[in-house]
Image (cartoon, rainbow, N blue to C red):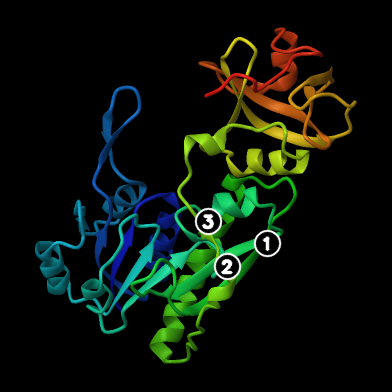
Amino acid sequence: MRIVFMGTPDFAVGTLQALVESGKHEIAAVITQPDRPKGRGQKMLMTPVKEYALTQALPVYQPAKVKTPEFIAQLRELQPEIIVVAAFGQLLNQEILTLPPLGCVNVHASLLPKYRGAAPIHYAIMQGEKESGVTIMQMDIGMDTGAMLSKVTVPIGSEMTMGELHDELKVKGAELLVRTLDELAAGTVKPEAQNEAEATYARLLDRAMEKIDWTQPAAKIHDLVRGFNPAPGAFTRLPDGKSLKIWKTALAAGASAPAGTVTAVTKKGFIVACGSGALEVLEVQPESKKRMEAKVFCNGRGVEPGTVLGNIEG
């Protein structure tokens, strides 16, 4: 097939790489988000997809908006048979969706209709799901509402982080997309409509979601910490108002105490009382410092029994 690929972050690189390495298709162009300034120096950085595309000498387009008549005219000139989308970051309009003869297919990192939207991998972990996966979907004008063409399921272990699930879905989704394109070419795909009654949404993450509420059950906080590792990170506040990112926890037995109270220092870190149950904190990152084992933080008198976390707002 003659393909136009649309994608931006590292997750999308896996799909583009699989298409290239399959040797079965012609990549007419790669569409990705514009370069943006990042970091303290505000240096302009290429998207991960652009970086990979340039190593393969693929034509790259970076429209600020894909819906403009000028860019749609460019798309028509490329004459794609199909457009493959993976975590692109812009919505497509009806004109683009119907431009290729085979339409547009999306590599979505959830088992649709669960977790439509922007952050499905984070939500699968945060909600304590036991499995996730990738759905290849025929795109329509709705938000991840199109007919499902294929699925692959991935189990989620009780300690699995968002980063680990991301990496597994990146590989599984890429493999599934290549197989699904073969089936589309052979005419053997059987589209399946989504059950709207089962639909859930993974809305954009915001700063308020990152703050740990110690009145929640220990298991819920544990899932939040896993779901925000390696980014953006869950945090709490120390009594002096400084932030403390929590990167790794384990469910623990703890003495009864008000939520947020450090009840003990252990060989591995420290135990915090929650709304129900307790968590052992194993890895932290104090404000303006590097990640470290929680026991190192405790050795530096970071916290001690009786310290109350999270009472400072913001």
**Residue 183 seen from this side:** yes
Instruction: Using the image, determine if residue 278 lies above or below residue 237.
Output: below
Q: Is residue 101 left or right of residue 279?
A: left
Dot label at residue 111: 2
- For badge 1, the amino acid type reads Glu
Mark 2 touches mark 1? (CB < 8 Å): yes
Quadrant in which the N terminus appears: bottom left
Q: Secondary structure at mark 2?
A: loop
Q: Amino acid at mark 3?
A: Pro
Question: Where in the figure is residue 170, as x and y percent of width and height?
Answer: 51, 57
Q: Nearer the viewer, residue 167 or 122?
A: 122
Q: Which residue is mark 1?
A: 131
Compared to 223, does 275 lie above or below? above
Mark 2 surroundings within 10 Å by alpha-carbon count, few (fewer than 14), some (14 through 19), many (20 or more): many
Q: Which residue is mark 3?
A: 120
Q: Earlier in the sequence, mark 2 or mark 3?
A: 2
Distance of label 1 from label 3 (alpha carbons): 12 Å
